Image (spheres, rainbow, N blue to C red):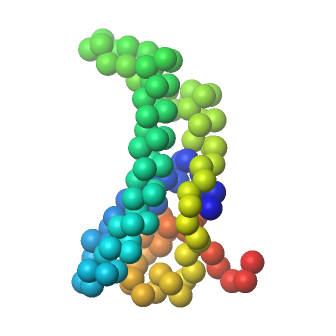
Amino acid sequence: MKVKNKDLGAINSALFSLGNHQGDISKRWAIAKLARKFNDANELLSNQINKLVEEQGKEDENGQKSLSPFNKDYLKLMDLDIDIECSYFTIEQLEEYSPTVQELVALEPIIKEGDD
């Protein structure tokens, strides 16, 4: 599946949250295996952001580099897609895990509704 870089952090957090409130170890393990793929992708994105900060960041009075959230390369990076090897969730599949509303909102980019 293709996921926007800007959605990775929220999806990753929601998957960990979803896994943490499962009572059944097999459900937690299933979510953990999926979450690892998103966690790895999120780490890759973080490395690219850190590289941008190092290359284009401006130092503040304390010597800390930061990047403007309006930096064109940062915005372009966040708008790109990353391929993650997994299938979209259906509502029926997620129902088994009793997600919260916050988790559903964060997972929306990887939920497939209907027959499309």
> Does residue 32 appear anywhere in the picture?
yes
User: Percent position (x, y) of residue 14?
Assistant: 40, 65
Residue 18, visible in the rendered structure: no
User: Relative to 101, is 44 above or below?
Assistant: above
Q: Position of residue 54 (x, y in %)?
A: 43, 19
Q: Is residue 65 above or below residue 14?
A: above
Q: Is residue 27 above or below residue 106?
A: below
Numbered circles on residues, count? 0
Relative to 106, say whether 46 is above or below. above
Whole-percent x, y for residue 84 in the image: 56, 57
Location of the N terminus (image quadrant): bottom right
Q: Is residue 76 left or right of residue 18?
A: right
At 58% from the left edge and 70% from the top edge, which residue is drawn?
A: 87
Q: Is residue 40 left or right of residue 72?
A: left
Q: Where does the C terminus fall, quadrant-wise? A: bottom right
The residue under the point 63% across, 48% down is: 81
Q: Position of residue 2 (x, y in %)?
A: 63, 57
Residue in view at x 63 percent, y 75 percent: 112
Q: Quadrant of residue 75?
A: top right
- Residue pushed farthest right? 116
Q: Based on the displayed image, in which of its 4 quarters is residue 97 positioned?
A: bottom left
**Residue at image x 26%, y 80%?**
25
Q: Toward which corner of the image does residue 73 lie, by quadrant?
A: top right
Closer to the camera in the image, 20 or 70: 20
